Amino acid sequence: MVMPMKKAIGAATWAFVIVWMIGLGDTPPRPDATGALPAARLLPVNLAAAATTGSQPATPPVPCPDLLAVVKAFFDANDAGRLDAGLAFLMDDATLASWAEGVNGYHMTERHLTGKAEIRGALGKPGLRRTTGRPNDPIYKETEAKVSGDTVKFILRPDRLRPSGKPYHPYQVELRFAGCKIKALTVVELITWL
């Protein structure tokens, strides 16, 4: 079978390139006539970029030994109003998605925030704290907590009914981690009555 000329030229070109690249491999430098090795050629390096990005590939974060302890400390800081301490548990580029969800799955008041600066204002809001500190407000308890890999999911359930007898809305919370830092939060207010 005769190979068309175009394919033959293409195959020969690639074979030449492969052989040429192999020849460029890790061959040691050859000494000159005096027996000295040639001076190394240094390439210019942006030291600031090298310090921030590094020349080595990024290594994945070490898994956190106790994600639930981090969640507890995060909520404790928010409950105490120490928002800067709460922010310390977040990655710089963390994300927060929050919305209210009705009984038929309808999303209301959906918000998406990125970065500590945007998220800071939301840390004192319901769903990201268990108590307001006011005696007539409910205290939310973590229930149905599940840890799966780098993700923690739970429901924040109120400890009492409203004065009208209707329940306060629970919150479904999901936190995804990179090591022991929170990289994504999702808070859904579960509307159980209107």
Image (tube, grey):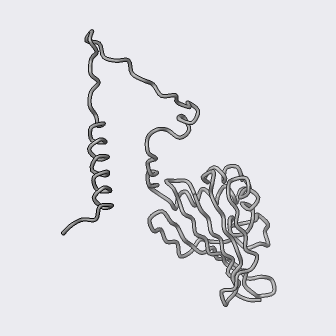
Given residues 60 and 144, the one toward you in this image is 60
| Total count of labels | 0
Residue nearest the viewer, comparing 97 with 8: 8
Q: Is residue 11 left or right of residue 90?
A: left
Instruction: Determine which quarter of the picture holds residue 168.
Output: bottom right
* Residue pictured at 57% horizontal, 65% vertical: 175
- Closer to us: 7 or 151: 7
Q: Toward which corner of the image does residue 52 lie, by quadrant?
A: top right
Position in image of residue 17 (x %, y %): 32, 46
Quarter occupied by the C terminus: bottom right
Viewer-nearest residue: 162 or 175 = 175
x and y, in percent, of residue 181 in the image: 55, 54
Above or below: residue 144 compared with residue 2: below
Relative to 37, residue 126 above or below: below
Look at 52% across and 53% down and name the residue there: 180
Identify the residue at horizontal 63%, vertical 49% (top origin).
88
Residue located 68% across and 69% down the image: 127
The N terminus: image quadrant? bottom left
Image coords of residue 96 (percent x, y): 66, 64
Q: Position of residue 71 (x, y in %)?
A: 57, 60
Q: Quadrant of residue 132?
A: bottom right
Position above or below: 94 against 100? above
Task: Name the side, left or right, on which 130 lies relative to 63.
Answer: right
